[in-house]
Image: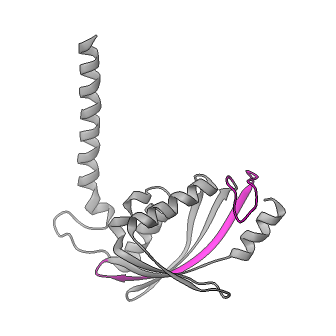
Amino acid sequence: MLNIIRNASHNYIDQVLRYCRFFFAALPHALGQSAASQEPVSPKELVRLFLSEVRSGKFPERAHLYMAGTVVAHQIQSEDPVSIERTPEEYANHVREFIRLFGQFEYQITELLADGQKVYARWIQNGCHLQEIDDHKPTGKPLIEYTSAVYRVEDGKIAEYWLQTDRKGLEMQLQRGH
């Protein structure tokens, strides 16, 4: 019996080590870099990877790969604009909160434009109403959120962004119960 446990334990460790070797070997490629050159990716590609991996909810823990140590996030709201500072870990928790509220949502980038160090992105997030949002009890029904943002990249990392979300559209969905 001990040999079975020992063998299972060794197999598990071997699998983890294989995964780690694969992950770290693939990391430069995932960041758009060749292992030999380690050349930085363009701001547009960096933001695309960030949105596809982190903001999409697939790998929030990878935020530190794309974000500066502290990022200024400007929440553009006509009645009360707010700017906050977020670390990559805080941003990862922010994405995890979306997953808690909306479930494992679908995320689609619909526009991505770059001008120098600034990148404009627009996306659609489709999820379900799983937790209370703005005093609206969860219904389990679909919710769609439309958002756009401009990201400023500095030294190969996202340093600042300006975000606008169709809050009225989300509010109307919540009021209708879907």
Which residue is found at the position 69% from the left and 75% from the top? 167
Residue 12 seen from this side: yes
Which residue is found at the position 43% from the left and 56% from the top? 59
Residue 176 drawn in magenta: no
Q: Quadrant of residue 46?
A: bottom left
Q: How far across and down, in percent of the image, does residue 130 sit?
A: 68, 52
Please determine whether, in this image, residue 126 is positioned above or below residue 14: below
In the picture, the quarter occupied by the C terminus is bottom right
Which residue is found at the position 29% from the left and 51% from the top? 23
Which residue is found at the position 74% from the left and 73% from the top? 169
Q: Quadrant of residue 31?
A: bottom left
**Farthest-out residue, front:** 135
Q: Is residue 11 left or right of residue 99?
A: left
Q: Nearer the viewer, residue 68 or 110?
A: 68
- The colour scheme used here is one colour
Q: Nearer the viewer, residue 120 or 138?
A: 138
Q: How far across and down, in percent of the image, does residue 106 sit?
A: 59, 58
Q: How far across and down, in percent of the image, does residue 30 sit?
A: 33, 61
Residue 142 drawn in magenta: yes
Residue 56 seen from this side: no
Q: How far across and down, in percent of the image, does residue 116 sit?
A: 38, 89
Q: Which residues are magenta?
A: 130-156
Q: Quadrant of residue 26?
A: bottom left
